[in-house]
Image: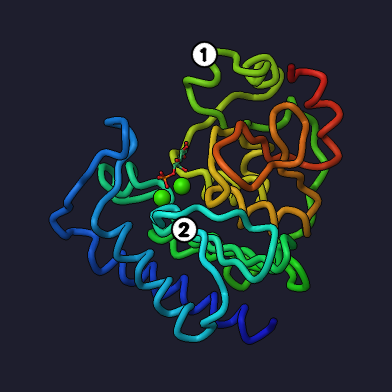
Amino acid sequence: MEDKYQFAKELVLDAGEFLRQHLEDELVIEEKGHFTDLVTQLDKTVQENLTAKIMERYPTDRILGEESLEHLPLGQGKVWVIDPIDGTTNFIVQKADFAVLVAYFEDGLGQFGLIYDVIEDKLYHGGGQFPVYENDRLLPPFQSKSLKEGLIGLNAGLYAQNYAGLGDMADHTLGTRSIGSAGISFAHVLTGRLLAQASYIYPWDYAAASILGEKLGYTMMTTSGKKPAFYGREYIIFAPTEKINEIKRYLR
Ligand code: IPD
Ligand code: CA
Ligand code: CA
């Protein structure tokens, strides 16, 4: 697994370097069903490059990528989960706060996860048998604090709707933040900048963070308190495991 993990780190760093080199390219922007759900030629190219490199080295492994035509379940076999650009809207409009996300599973068990904040040049990596790092800095497990000492990552829509009681929960924290990249928001939970993060997202958005978080005392669950299905889109909250019972008191 060590070889595969090193390979994955190089893969993700190279993808980030590619995106930095192409940051000022003229973008071909397409809508995927709604004018706020965008994809560019660079999302597709990065996914194609990652897929080609993985297939060349591990021809029998399988890929679950956001931009793939087929979205397979990841319960069986060796599966790489890829989000080539997490935060495409940020990539287009802000040229910052976007990430490359990769997670690797064997028979449904997370082996390692990678979140690469491309502009900050911060790679969050580890999980499974590997300790969790931000670049070369070993990340400690969750450092205990109360809800009212922390911030929650939550977008304005979910807060305004008080979806599943998330607004009520947020009212018992110092406030909300909304970054526009689920992957980077989850990384902020891992470093303690956010206490928790809730979003309506797909497996490629949360797979890497769920593997990293398991190692450091965080839980990825649906807002109804279940284990995520790792299939289709769900309302997900990522929070310190020791806070889950308290958080559940606000959720409905
Ligand atoms: C999106 C981002 C965003 C989240 C959306 C995701 P994408 O990913 O993670 O923060 O709110 O639900 O779809 O489409 O830019 O890869
Ligand atoms: Ca995404
Ligand atoms: Ca994406």
**Residue 64, image x and y in percent?**
51, 59
Query: Which residue is at the far left?
Result: 26
Report the number of numbered marks. Answer: 2
Examine the rendered structure and indicate whether residue 23 appears above or below residue 32: below
Of residue 241 and residue 34, the one placed in the foreground of this image is 34
Instruction: Name the amino acid, label 2.
Output: Gly
Q: Which residue is mark 2?
A: 65
Point out which mark residue 160 bears.
1
Q: Residue at x 34, y 44 (%)?
A: 90
Quadrant of residue 136 within the rendered picture = bottom right
Q: Residue at x 36, y 73 (%)?
A: 49
Element type where label 1 sits in the image: helix
Q: Tell me what residue is drawn at x 48 percent, y 22 percent.
A: 156
Residue 146 found in image quarter: top right
Is the residue 164 above or below the residue 91 in the image? above
Q: Is residue 165 visible?
A: yes
